[in-house]
Image (spheres, grey):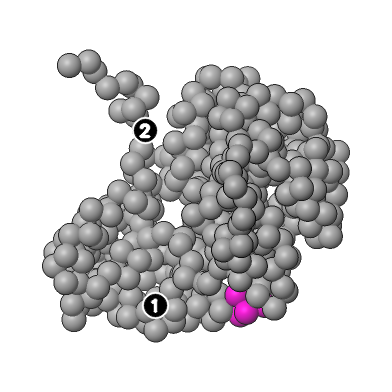
Amino acid sequence: MPDISQRGLQMPASPIRKLVPYAEAAKKRGIKVYHLNIGQPDIKTPEVAINAIRNYNGKVIEYSHSAGNESYRKALAEKYCKNGIEVDYNQILITTGGSEAILFSMFTCLNPGDEIIIPEPFYTNYNAFALTAGIVVKPITSTIENGFALPPISVFEKSITSKTKAIMICNPNNPTGYLYSKEELLQLRDLVIKYDLYLFSDEVYREFCYDGEQPFSVMNLEGIDQKVIMVDSVSKRYSVCGVRIGALITRNKDIIDTALKFAQARLSPPSLGQIVGEASLQTPDTYFTEVYDEYIARRNFVIDELNKIPGVFAPKPKGAFYAIISLPIDDSDRFCQWLLEDFNYQNQTVMLAPASGFYATPGLGKTEVRIAYVLKIDDLRNAVKCLEQALLVYPGRVV
């Protein structure tokens, strides 16, 4: 039998999804599982998006332009401009989720063997995308003690080599919920200029910023127009994760032209997904006000309750709907599996994502987990209670 490829063997399993079989087995045993492992909001999709599907009357579901429907790109460009990000529709490439936008960015700007610097912990699939593109992730570690703020620029500089071609951030951050300030972004801007690097910014959670904080887009950093790529997605903004529509945005025409060749190779982004994405742009502001208020309430509740549990530390996120929390445990992978395989409290348990999968540095994240506060407060209350009870009896608890 032929061997499996080295690429396949090296591809990491997702910490968000790899424990799904254990969750499914627990459910078959009659145990209710509270899913805090994945950013799948229970917020209703806007009616304008649902109606776009219901009212679709085309006779054929056709391919779209490889860059995405022109009407959608024009509407999206108008939306960005209204939000203070000046772009033209020709500077937008519609992709199959934000994931494909990241892949196309890596394929376009980096060669196999090149290096990309990413503050860790970071969205676990960045590792997978880098492996697919044949590039090397150089992690810069942020810490829970200061809420996962951007590490000192001097640490970035020490990691730059002749192979370093890009820096990537997620702002607001998944998995930490940290929101990078304008001052931090300006420091990165200066570094990008000094070493002639690209700056990739995953800004899919831009609408989810709390406590009066405002996001600052890398698209508005002066002096690096030709070095910046912004990644976006409709998934979380409109609670339409399943339509798989994202965007690559840059003012660099060579990047757009080159990325388009990769886009042509996959033919087109999902046609029905683009219809939903375009319709979603008409979502009324009241929808976002309600969503914002709901997430603020969920964040405040779950962070406050978690910090009441002995040995637990949960910094308060400034954005997105995730948090990395520290637990008094020996191994987060073992603990998260144990929760599903061997534990229940009143016939309930909680599914978490081990934080080890959000780091590139081996050994980090072993006492941390990521939670997604995407459930109703009553469910969050039950989930926190399950976690509290689990920590009392977990065999690998660290005192």
Residue 336 locus on image (x, y percent): 27, 59
Residue at position x 33%, y 21% in the image: 6
Q: Which residue is most to the top?
A: 2
Magenta residues span 289-293
Left or right: 97, with 397 as reference point = right
Q: What residue type is labelled 2?
A: Met
Taken as a whole, is the magenta stretch helix, strand or loop? Answer: helix
Residue wearing tag 1: 380
Residue 226 vs 144, above or below: the answer is above
Residue wearing tag 2: 11
Residue 293 locus on image (x, y percent): 61, 80
Q: Nearer the viewer, residue 119 or 133?
A: 133
Q: Nearer the viewer, residue 79 or 330?
A: 79
Secondary structure type for disc 2: loop
Circle 2 Cα neighbour tier, 10 Å, few/some/many (<14 / 14–19 / ≥20): some
Left or right: 308, with 399 as reference point = right
Residue at position x 51%, y 26% in the image: 133
Residue 320 vs 300, above or below: the answer is above
Q: Is residue 243 magenta?
A: no
Residue 89 vs 266, above or below: the answer is below
Left or right: 6, with 184 as reference point = left
First reached walking from the N terminus: tag 1 or tag 2: 2
Circle 1 Cα neighbour tier, 10 Å, few/some/many (<14 / 14–19 / ≥20): many
